[in-house]
Image: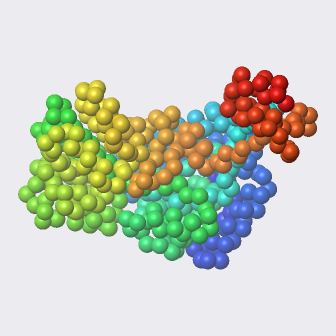
Amino acid sequence: MDVSVFHPTAVPVVPPTAQGVEKVAQDLRSVYSSGKTKTFEWRVSQLKALLKITTRHEKDIFEALRSDLNKSEHDAYFHELYGVSASCTLALKELHRWMMPERVNTSMVNFPSTAEIVSEPLGVVLVISPWNYPFIVGAIAAGNAVVLKPSEVAPATSSLLSNLLGSIWIHQLSKLLKVVWNSNVGRIILTAAAKHLTPVVLELGGKCPVVVDSNIDLVIDALSSELENFYGRDPMQSKELSRIINSRHFDRLTKLLDDKKISGKVVIGGQRDKANLIAPTVILDAPEDSLIMNEEIFGPLLPIVTVDKIEDSFGLINSKGKPLAAYLFTNDKKLKEEFIRNVSAGGMAINETITHIAEPTLPFGGVGESGMGAYHGKFSFDTFSHKKAILQREFEGDVDIRYPPFTPGKVKLKRALLTGDILGIPRALIGW
């Protein structure tokens, strides 16, 4: 495949210098100002090129994900590749409809008039991709000029993207935004963007709590049995177990496991090795002041906290930052309703976990501490679009009640029209 057909940015790779940043910004603004990226044909060509990459370079993508994460082909396809190809396919199918102006009703205030909402691209956007979902679709579908900054934490995947896409920009994020990766990175990015009034979409993280009703068979014995079915008696030898992305994250998770406050509370797993592998691990009754209960985990560690009443779990969840996702396992209809009503989270799944992110008809994104904005399907298109309000009138049909002098008759008629007082309209006209 001639990868040159894919030009989301149409600029060359440049070094991570201040001059390089400004050069990229100028070139992208020039590309966007030409109007090329806004056309339906351009967007379709880019989406088709991206879709071809997912099919023609499937093996290369699998190898990169294996190198970075030791992901099996199954996980690489269903967790990564399928999501990209499905998003491209959906966007290609629906793009014409997404781009059409949306007609809306107008009120009596502007009678006679027509109104519509036009989706226009935000302009030049920077996509800072996390290492676990390193592909883009929505920004291209919305007609933006795009700089893709893959994660330096996943070098094999980033290198592959550089080769396949041709015009992406890869270097240390700290050099781009002059920040250091830490738990407050979202705040730092938002602060940096605020200086230029740049809109930001953040998918962050935090904890994703799972509430399990006491009558559901998800207790320790069931977890142990199923984990053995998945990974065998020695999960460290399983080909299905992905490794931690790098030694820094491995050390971070090891620190959570070595916390003295959870000593003796590991009931399943706990094994680890120097190849950045950590076995699925369950910690029973982790204290609230332990590290694992107060830091984002993002690894195969599951702390379990028991409560006297299941409703108490709602308060425990709400006492922390709002999660990216929250889950409930129960057959109690009333409990489901209470959970949905009382727990705030980016998204939810009942009697299931994670799979809600596979539904293109549902927005995926955080709230509060877990992020802002959402994507998936049309939500991705909308996230990278500005909704421009358009009101149109003809010169005919103007009425003098809009203009001074505001006589009592005019005021009565305007109030009747604005409030929908059907009887008041003829009364005002009679008393004009």
Would residue 373 appear left or right of 281 to someone viewing this image? Answer: right
Which residue does the image show at 49% across and 52% down from the upper left? Answer: 372
User: x and y percent of residue 93 in the render?
Assistant: 63, 32
Q: Kindly tell me whether residue 9 is visible in this rendering.
A: no
Q: Kindly tell me whether residue 377 is visible in this rendering.
A: yes
Using the rendered view, name the quadrant where residue 52 is placed. top right
Would residue 48 appear left or right of 350 to someone viewing this image? Answer: right
User: x and y percent of residue 333 in the render?
Assistant: 28, 26
Which residue does the image show at 18% across and 48% down from the upper left? Answer: 304
**In the image, residue 234 above or below residue 31:** above
Q: Residue furthest right?
A: 396
Query: Looking at this view, is 82 or 335 the one in front?
Result: 335
Query: Looking at this view, is 341 or 236 the one in front?
Result: 341
User: x and y percent of residue 309 in the render?
Assistant: 16, 39
Which residue does the image show at 63% across and 33% down from the upper left? Answer: 94
Which residue does the image show at 20% across and 34% down from the upper left? Answer: 213
> Total number of numbered labels?
0
**In the image, residue 398 above or below residue 164:** above
* Colouring chosen for the image of the structure: rainbow
